[in-house]
Image (cartoon, grey):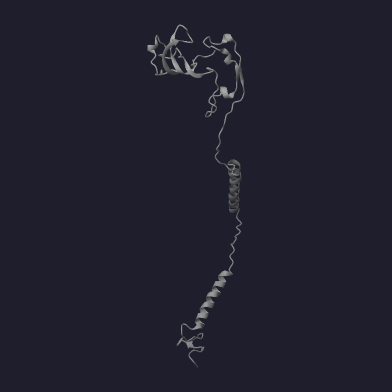
């Protein structure tokens, strides 16, 4: 019988399985390659068709059962009581970006008698008028506030020309034309000196320098 055939043999008194003789066997023989490939495919099929399930163990113990329910109750109380109700977790919060604008509306009518006005006011009639927000809200807008004018000095009908300087301005009073240097302005004055010394239009007993500027000049005298 050939050595490549299956034979039962007895070794050390024990009947063993038949052996395959590999004598003269080529490792590149297709039979061996097909056997190895088939074994790998069979192994991969077993892994592919496997299914795993968790194992559930029922423990009948009062202490363990109470502890389990207590943990569940604590989690429910935390989610419902603290996270949802107390912290309002169902609401979405975001920082606010906004701006506030204050607007004042309304009109005012001033109707004072002649006796209530200051004697230094040449024309009290210009103060008897209607005032709207454009007149008494100065400036029109402020940061977190608004300003309402409660007193005002009106210098009406101003034009560029020549007129007497305000006698209350330092350096405006003069005796002759020499005291008024032509072309030089006074520090707190209302215009440029013309070089002439003229009578004041406020007090005829005083002489002041004539200026070139906006005439009549503003006089800081409260109307009331």
Residue 43 as seen in the image, left or right of residue 182: right
Q: Nearer the viewer, residue 212 or 156?
A: 212
Q: Is residue 55 above or below residue 164?
A: below
Q: Position of residue 90 (x, y in %)?
A: 61, 44
Residue 28 as seen in the image, left or right of residue 74: left
| Quarter occupied by the C terminus | top right
Q: Position of residue 15 (x, y in %)?
A: 50, 86
Q: Nearer the viewer, residue 112 or 101?
A: 112
Q: Residue furthest top?
A: 205
How many marks do you count on the picture? 0
Residue 210 as seen in the image, left or right of residue 82: left
Q: Residue at x 50, y 81 (%)?
A: 32
Q: Residue at x 57, y 15 (%)?
A: 126
Q: Quadrant of residue 168?
A: top left
Q: Quadrant of residue 145?
A: top right
Q: Residue at x 44, y 14 (%)?
A: 210
Q: Nearer the viewer, residue 77 or 147?
A: 147
Q: Position of residue 140 (x, y in %)?
A: 55, 27
Q: Nearer the viewer, residue 85 or 33?
A: 33
Q: Position of residue 141 (x, y in %)?
A: 54, 28
Q: Is residue 96 above or below residue 76?
A: above
């Amino acid at each position: 019988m050939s050595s490549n055939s299956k034979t039962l043999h007895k070794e050390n008194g024990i009947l063993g399985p038949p052996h395959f003789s590999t004598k003269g066997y080529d490792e590149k023989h297709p039979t061996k390659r097909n056997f190895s490939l088939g074994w790998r495919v069979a192994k991969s099929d077993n892994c592919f068709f496997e299914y795993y399930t968790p194992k559930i163990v029922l423990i009948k113990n009062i202490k363990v059962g109470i502890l389990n329910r207590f943990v569940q109750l604590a989690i429910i109380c935390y989610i419902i009581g603290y996270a949802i109700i107390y912290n309002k977790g169902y609401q979405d919060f975001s920082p606010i970006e906004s701006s506030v604008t204050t607007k004042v509306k309304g009109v005012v009518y001033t109707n004072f008698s002649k006796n209530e006005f200051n004697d230094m006011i040449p024309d009290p009639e210009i103060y008897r008028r209607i005032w709207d927000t454009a007149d008494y809200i100065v400036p029109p807008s402020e940061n977190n506030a608004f300003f309402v004018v409660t007193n005002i000095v009106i210098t009406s009908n101003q034009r560029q020309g020549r007129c007497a300087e305000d006698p209350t301005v330092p350096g405006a009073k003069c005796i002759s034309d020499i005291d008024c240097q032509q072309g030089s302005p006074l520090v707190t004055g209302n215009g440029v000196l013309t070089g002439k010394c003229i009578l004041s239009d406020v007090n005829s007993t005083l002489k002041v320098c004539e200026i070139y500027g906006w005439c009549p000049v503003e006089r800081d005298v409260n109307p009331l």
